[in-house]
Image (cartoon, rainbow, N blue to C red):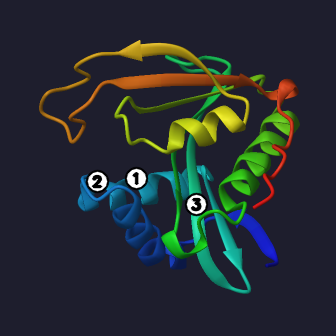
Amino acid sequence: MKLKIRLGKQSDKKDYILTQKEAFPFFDSIRDKKVFDIKLQRNEIFIAESEGIYTGHLIFSDYRILPPFTGSVFIESIAVKKTFQGKGIGTALIEHLMTYCKKKKIPIIHLGTSDKEDNKAIAFYKRQGFRKVGFLEDINPESEYDCNQLFYAIEVNRWKMPIKKEK
């Protein structure tokens, strides 16, 4: 599979929303549409595609100057279509973000994820070299989050491409 990672464009919006909904069915689609527009304007969305087919995305915020994660990038979402999971797309998106951070001299990447037992993302992040740096309980009882949040981080210069397990 030949994979290409690129900046998002307006024509990606429909696939972005569908992929977000598939990965995070409890998220608000109206909010996701607004997030897409903001991230598109700020060039903070990377799209993965294979032979012209949308396979996934990574959205982030660049906090080089602004708090709360000053001097870092915060991954807000990584989503890969179910039919393309397990093919290295998430890793390719992380690798692309690492390259972005190295070029911009951003030393750290942060992310947040749920503490639910069935959260497969935690194992993925650990394979990427992220380590737990924080925990937040009862983030907002009125939000779509019905769980606590774990925070992970990695120093960009310490990231190494994970070794793919033999099946």
Label 1: element kind: helix
Q: Are marks 1 and 2 in contact (CB under 8 Å)?
A: yes
Residue at the spot 24% in from the left edge and 55% down from the top edge: 28
Q: Hey, which residue is sitting farthest left in the picture?
A: 142
Please state the horizontal and vertical placement of residue 67, each as a whole percent of the image: 52, 17
In the rendered image, which residue does mark 3 sit on? Answer: 57
Q: Nearer the viewer, residue 140 or 64?
A: 140
Crowd around label 1: few <14 · some 14–19 · many ≥20 (10 Å)? some
Mark nearer the viewer, 2 or 3: 3
Label 2: element kind: helix
In the rendered image, which residue does mark 1 sit on? Answer: 35
Q: How many marks?
A: 3
Residue at the spot 54% in from the left edge and 76% down from the top edge: 83
Please state the horizontal and vertical placement of residue 142, each as a whole percent of the image: 12, 33
Label 3: element kind: strand
Q: Amino acid at mark 2?
A: Arg
Of the 4 image quadrants, the one containing the C terminus is bottom right
Q: Nearer the viewer, residue 120 or 26?
A: 120
Q: Quadrant of residue 6?
A: bottom right
- Distance from the alpha carbon under mark 2 to that under mark 3: 17 Å
Height in image: 52 above or below 68? below
Please state the horizontal and vertical placement of residue 147, each as a whole percent of the image: 26, 30
Instruction: For residue 70, say whether it is visible.
Output: yes
User: Which comes sooner in the sequence, label 2 or label 3?
Assistant: 2
Residue at the spot 72% in from the left edge and 51% down from the top edge: 91
User: Which comes sooner in the sequence, label 3 or label 1?
Assistant: 1
Q: Amino acid at mark 3?
A: His
Instruction: For residue 63, say whether it is visible.
Output: no
In the rendered image, which residue does mark 2 sit on? Answer: 31
